[in-house]
Image (cartoon, rainbow, N blue to C red):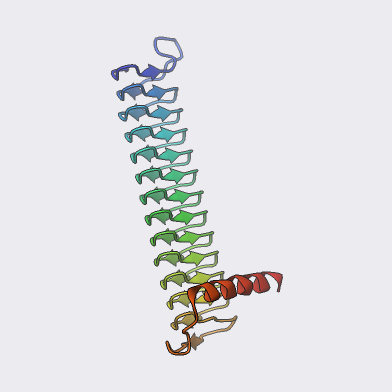
Amino acid sequence: KKHGEGAFLGTEGSPTAREGNEANGRSSSLVGGSANLISGELGFLGGGFRNKVSGSGSVVVGGNANTASGVRSFVGGGNVNNSSGELSTIVGGNLNTASGTKSAIGGGNVNVASGPNSVVAGGQSNKALGQNSSIGGGSLNLARANSSTISGGAGNSATGEGAVVSGGFQNEARGDYSAIPGGRSLILEGTRSFGFNGSDQKITIPKEVSSRSEEHTSELQSQFRISYAVF
């Protein structure tokens, strides 16, 4: 069915037309597939099954039961993905949600990117909640604070602003601008604190000791990551 002004419905009226497609958005385009729906103006839907495009200027390329509801949002494919944030992107995977403005998910399963400009590259059950937060992969990782980063591993959390966890298992970077390269059950509570590989450790640096400038701390963190990568 085509109801939107200036809408395009692929294979309309031909013997190969699929049933159940609806292009209701003004100047929208629905190329193929079945049981797909476009209600947003200037939306595009390539194909697949039971996909929905409701955001203005949004795109779903294919897959199944995917939704692009944010303004100019994008879903490449996969299954049951929801790109609801403005300018949000989901490339693929399953059951992923990108609700933050300009958030992005590369793939994987059951990942969430809800912070503005947040990124989850892949993995499973990862959550990037802070503004400018990012998770590279792994599983059950949580980047809650602004500008926090988790590269991978499992069960890691970065709850301090600018905190970094490179990997490992159940590590917690609680202090602002703290950094953990890996290991297991390592906890950093001090601001600008640094932890090394270990087990069941807890490191706290008093505030009066950690009075360096943020610029110097950022440089040290960069050098630290490079040294760990080389090692």
Q: Nearer the viewer, residue 61 or 86?
A: 86
Q: Is residue 145 visible in this depiction of the protein?
A: yes
Q: Residue at x 49, y 46 (%)?
A: 93
Q: Nearer the viewer, residue 123 or 162?
A: 162
Q: Is residue 181 visible in this depiction of the protein?
A: no
The image quadrant where one finds the N terminus is: top left
Q: Residue at x 44, y 44 (%)?
A: 89
Q: Nearer the viewer, residue 127 or 222?
A: 222
Q: Quadrant of residue 226?
A: bottom right
The image quadrant where one finds the C terminus is: bottom right
Q: Does residue 221 sit above or below 200 in this rendering?
A: above
Q: Does residue 35 sit above or below 188 in this rendering?
A: above
> Left or right: 94 with respect to 184?
left
> Left or right: 231 with respect to 186?
right
Q: Does residue 105 sit above or below 229 in this rendering?
A: above
Q: Residue at x 52, y 71 (%)?
A: 165
**Percent position (x, y) of residue 33?**
44, 25
**Percent position (x, y) of residue 146?**
40, 65
> Left or right: 151 with respect to 75?
right
**Percent position (x, y) of residue 7?**
35, 19
Q: Does residue 210 sit above or below 119 in this rendering?
A: below
